[in-house]
């Protein structure tokens, strides 16, 4: 349910052809290293196997500015750390200048509304966050993600597996 505070904010599904829409979310190099490059993100979104299993979303604020971006994966595109039937969140980025202003929380709230409509039986949303990315870990905890205690070994550091119950 949309509140007055969220009025006008929206998720815009995007395809592999919509890269220009999210180019405005240029991140500093230290954040880009954790979020993943747009080259890789859009290469994956343009693969034939992405249709129906990997979806990009732009987050648009009331004035029409794109301020966030993320990708959802499910089915055969889910990562090895995710149990069957889950949907996973990837490449989550908030535009510099909008970070620390509640945009990430608003993105997840919009996503919860999307889940209620599009995936009503989905029990949780999961993500993996690099254990060195302390600001992201703090932000995910603040918006309701819980550390599952599971780890996925990857270089340069293990990833922590977080889940968010969708009620």
Image: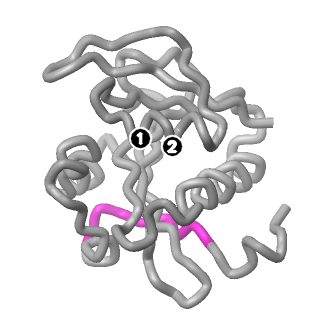
Q: Is 101 above or below relative to 163?
A: below
- Checking the image for residue 139, the label placed there is 2
Left or right of 136? Residue 155 is left
| Image: magenta residue range | 10-19
Residue underneath mark 1: 136
Residue 114 location (% of width, % of height):
68, 54
Nearer to us in this view, 146 or 85: 146
Residue at the image point whose x is 76% and y is 33% from the top: 121
Measured Cα–Cα span from mark 2 to mark 1: 5 Å
- Checking the image for residue 73, the label placed there is none
Left or right of 101? Residue 67 is left
The quarter of the rendered structure image containing the N terminus is bottom right
Asked if marks 2 and 1 touch (Cβ < 8 Å), the reply is yes
Q: Residues within 10 Å of mark 2 (few under 14, many from 20)?
A: some
Left or right of 140? Residue 40 is left
Q: Secondary structure at mark 1?
A: helix
Q: Is 10 above or below relative to 136?
A: below
The reply to whether residue 106 is in sight is: yes
Q: Secondary structure at mark 2?
A: helix
């Amino acid at each position: 349910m949309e509140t007055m505070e969220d009025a006008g904010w929206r998720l815009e599904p995007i395809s592999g052809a919509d890269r220009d829409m999210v180019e405005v979310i240029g991140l500093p190099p230290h954040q880009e290293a954790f979020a993943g490059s747009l080259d890789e993100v859009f290469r994956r979104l343009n693969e034939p196997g992405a249709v129906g299993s990997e979806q990009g979303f732009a987050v648009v604020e009331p004035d029409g500015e794109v301020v966030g971006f993320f990708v959802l994966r499910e089915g055969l595109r889910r990562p090895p750390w995710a149990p069957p039937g889950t949907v996973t969140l990837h490449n989550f980025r908030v535009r510099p200048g909008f970070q620390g202003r509640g945009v990430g929380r608003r993105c997840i709230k919009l996503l919860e509304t999307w889940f209620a409509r599009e995936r009503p039986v989905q029990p949780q949303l999961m993500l993996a966050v690099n254990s060195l990315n302390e600001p992201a870990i703090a932000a995910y905890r603040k918006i309701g993600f819980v550390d599952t205690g599971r780890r996925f070994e990857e270089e340069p550091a293990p990833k922590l597996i977080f889940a968010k119950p969708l009620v």
